[in-house]
Amino acid sequence: MENGFSGEVLGNARSPRGRLPSLGEIGLNNFAPYIMNRVMARWNANLAEELKTRDMTTAKMRALAVLSVSPSLTINELAVFAVMEQSTMSRTVDSLEEQGFISRTPRPGDMRVRDVSITEDGRALFEDVWPTMYEGLGQMFKDIDDDEYRAFLTTLHKILRNIRRHDL
């Protein structure tokens, strides 16, 4: 399979050696999924510390964040955007509804579908946490200029297109 690399960074499957490079040859610091996992694990850990004081989890806050910019979504759509398994999202939505942070309403025209929306209390909670999230974003991209940030987002969007399984 064509991997799109010249072979300088990750090796090339068509190399004269006739084999794929090992992870040891590539190195963890050149293996993008490893670096992305480290970045997101640190982001989630930092956010989790702030959320504990509000009886919230990162999963709940991701759901509220997505709903803060979407009028309503189904649980399946919300699971995709919040990057969660559908079963985990269902439990998360149940808990958020019990806490009064979201509401579920039957969709007009198809009573089997429930639309999930953020409530005023949920929006107030998200807006209370948003400054912490924005500060974390600023720390993450400290010393990175606008052009680098835009290029980074462009690359991430290309990666997402290459690997995604949903049209969302």
Image: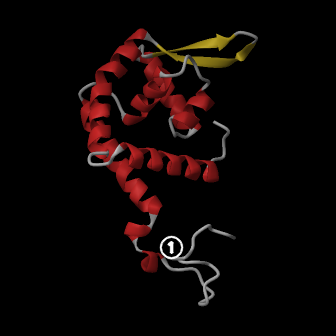
- Kindly identify which residue carries mark 1: 10
Quarter holding the N terminus? bottom right
Q: Residue at x 71, y 9 (%)?
A: 108
The outermost residue toward the right is 109
Q: Is residue 9 depicted above or below 109 in this figure?
A: below
Q: Is residue 1 toward the left or the right of residue 45 in the image?
A: right
| Residue 55 in view in this figure | no
Q: Position of residue 162 (x, y in %)?
A: 63, 53
Q: Position of residue 113 (x, y in %)?
A: 68, 19
Q: Is residue 110 depicted above or below 49 in this figure?
A: above
| Residue 165 in view in this figure | yes
- As rendered, which of 146 and 111 lies closer to the eye? 146
Q: Residue at x 50, y 35 (%)?
A: 82
Image quarter of residue 50: top left
Q: Position of residue 19 (x, y in %)?
A: 60, 84
Disc tally is 1
Image quarter of residue 110: top right
Q: Which type of secondary structure does the marked residue at label 1 adopt? A: loop
Quarter holding the C terminus? top right
- As rendered, which of 6 and 66 lies closer to the eye? 6
Q: Is residue 80 toward the left or the right of residue 139 in the image?
A: right
Q: Amino acid at mark 1?
A: Leu
Q: Residue at x 60, y 84 (%)?
A: 15
Q: Residue at x 54, y 29 (%)?
A: 90
The outermost residue toward the bottom is 17
The outermost residue toward the front is 147
Instruction: Rate crowding at label 1 as few (under 14), some (14 to 19) or many (20 or more) other CA atoms within 10 Å.
Output: some
Q: Position of residue 84 (x, y in %)?
A: 52, 39
